[in-house]
Amino acid sequence: MICLLMLVQAGASGVRPALAPSPSPTPTPTPACAPVFRVAFVADVAGLRSSVDAAGWRGVNQAVSEAACASAELALPTRPSEYRRLLQDYAGRDLVIAGSFLMTDAVVEIARTNPTTHFVLVDPIVMPPDVPNLAVLTFRSDQAAFLAGALAGILTRSHLVAGVYGPAGAMDTTNRTFFERGARYVSPGVRVLGAYQPAASAPYADPAWGAAQARSFVHEHADVIFGTGGTTGQGALLGATQSGALCISEGLAPSSEPACVIATSVKFVDRGVKMTVAD
């Protein structure tokens, strides 16, 4: 009995052999960003004041921020004659995005000249010729304009609404045609006024003219204004606000909407560009 007790005590108080330290885990190497996927975004002359250009550049940044090895560059031309040069300057990148239909001819030409570079054209008015390395993002402006007109026809109390448009390009005539159809569809007796931006002013970049035209329409008792055509349309919204009318905008970010805005037609250009860059 005594021997057994001593053995138990000895076992309990014995010194255990030291354990060998565990080896430190080997850190997983971070993948090197070589090569980096490089994206260039070329805006039109309106720059990021254009809702379409701003949305496109936002989509590029969203895509790049979620990629492990990607970078983005922004080009802001000051005149249309710079479009071809800038697109060519960035043709060494992996992807070059022409952010506006105003660059349709230029990007088609440069894409053909640089067949190993991928190009994207955002929202052209007319579909360009098929070029293997040129992708095209299109949106249904006609449907958006029709719905804007329908809303204007519902909300007007004076039975007179109006639209302010860009310089009578194909997209401008589409916006006007379908805005007027939408207004008359819900209110057959409504009068619809409209004006295209004069050819002599800066295309899609004349907010002063847009504001003056909107004020003129309100003076004629139009109480809902549809403002389209880049910063020209944004000027129309400002003129409507100053005159106390309601207005419908085309693709403005909520933070930049004037007080008159009751609705905005949105194309989600940022989502389309983001998906294209990610692919």
Image (cartoon, grey):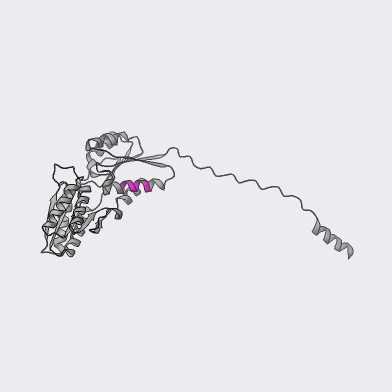
Q: Can residue 137 be seen here?
A: no
Residue 92: percent from left, percent from top: 34, 34
Rendering quarter of residue 72 = top left
Q: Residue at x 20, y 50 (%)?
A: 235
Q: Nearer the viewer, residue 270 or 107?
A: 270
Say left or right for 195 vs 33.
Answer: left
Q: Can residue 37 be seen here?
A: yes
Q: Residue at x 85, y 60 (%)?
A: 7
Residue 25: percent from left, percent from top: 60, 46
Q: Nearer the viewer, residue 255 or 116?
A: 255
Residue 17: percent from left, percent from top: 76, 51
Identify the residue at the far right of this view: 2
Which quarter of the rendering shows the N terminus? bottom right
Majority secondary structure in the magenta region: helix
Magenta-tinted stretch:
56-62
Residue 217: percent from left, percent from top: 13, 55
Residue 91 against residue 54 in the figure, above or below: above
